[in-house]
Amino acid sequence: MKQQTLVIDPEFKAQIPPLTEDERKQLEENILADGEILSPILVWNDTIVDGHNRYEILQNHPEISFTVYPLTLENREQVLVWICKNQLGRRNLTPEQKKFLIGKQYDAEKHDGFHGNQHTLPASSGGVQNEHQQTAEKTCERIARENRVSSSSVRRAALFAQGVDLADKLCPGIRLQVLRGDLKAPDILFERLAKAAPEEYDVILEQIKNPRPKTKPTAKQQAPQLQEHLPTSYTAAKLPYAEPHFEEVGGYPKDPSAAYAQLDVAAAKMQETWTFIFKQTPNLRTDPEHRKAVQAILEKHLNFLNTLSRSLEFSEADEERSA
């Protein structure tokens, strides 16, 4: 029996987390043992939506039959959304794979909502641009809720996915390396690439391809470890905290070690304070209203830290370009 010829769309396939060699070998062995494909390959207009790996294996085993099941979807964006949501239902995703899929889903839904369909068509009254922005915000919040992340995480995931796709366009194969976990570049580099001007691509891409190895801090540099059982008066309150005092030379501190120490102490105090409060008030984690309030507080400070981190990395990039 001649196999039905299906189409593999590169963009659709790129949303599917790649199999390891062992996983692919195991899948092929299972197919050969069964003598057939037990689950139908899902298609949209004869283009594979789910079942890329099975179909590719079948090309080496034309004697094995399979069935297809057509999905009723209106356009490419809806297909991309379906693929992302289906893959996000898996339990064995890496953090990079999950972030990439969330970002791709958000972008696809925004694009589909802008053109309009029965699910995301804006109301007829009011400004179109404002309505589209409100729809995008609702989409962001819904995707955040579905994946148990914050709205800001969804927006950053979209930048991450855009950066990964752009990096792969500039240097084919990077997407696969990132999603497989072979390339451990900081997520923020992909976010920065997504927002960069074309003349900045080479510098950022080089940083992505050759990430700096993470060095373990020495014992003196490590933040103090939390005690197994914190006392009523949490230990952070006892940490020394002196006023800054720098001997400046040409506008720069001669010895900035005092600043390092104070930043370290401030971080340790924050960690111990939050840990102590959560131990004393456990319903902050379990009550939905409390969780929402705590998340709002946390997100405000995370935004500050993210902004600070980005400014430090941008300063580093500026120094490298001027060197």
Image: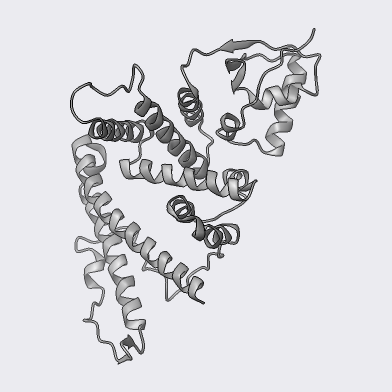
Measuring 40% from the left and 26% from the top, which residue is drawn there? 112
What x and y, as percent, mark residue 191?
44, 51
Measuring 25% from the left and 38% from the top, which residue is drawn there? 286
- Camera sees residue 282: no
Indicate how the structure is coloured in the image.
one colour
Measuring 23% from the left and 22% from the top, which residue is drawn there? 123
What x and y, as percent, mark residue 151?
31, 40
Where 264 sits versus 25, above or below? below
Residue 38 is drawn in which quadrant?
top right
Where 75 sits versus 92, above or below? above
Quarter of the picture containing the N terminus is top right
Query: Which residue is nearer to you in this view: 192 or 301?
Result: 192
Query: Which residue is nearer to you in this view: 237 or 182?
Result: 182
Q: How many marks?
A: 0
What x and y, as percent, mark residue 302?
30, 54
Measuring 62% from the left and 13% from the top, which residue is drawn there? 40
Furthest-top residue in view?
Answer: 1
What x and y, as percent, mark residue 66?
70, 12
Where 171 sits versus 145, above or below? below
- Camera sees residue 37: yes
Residue 202 is drawn in which quadrant?
bottom right
Query: Which residue is nearer to you in this view: 304 or 109?
Result: 109
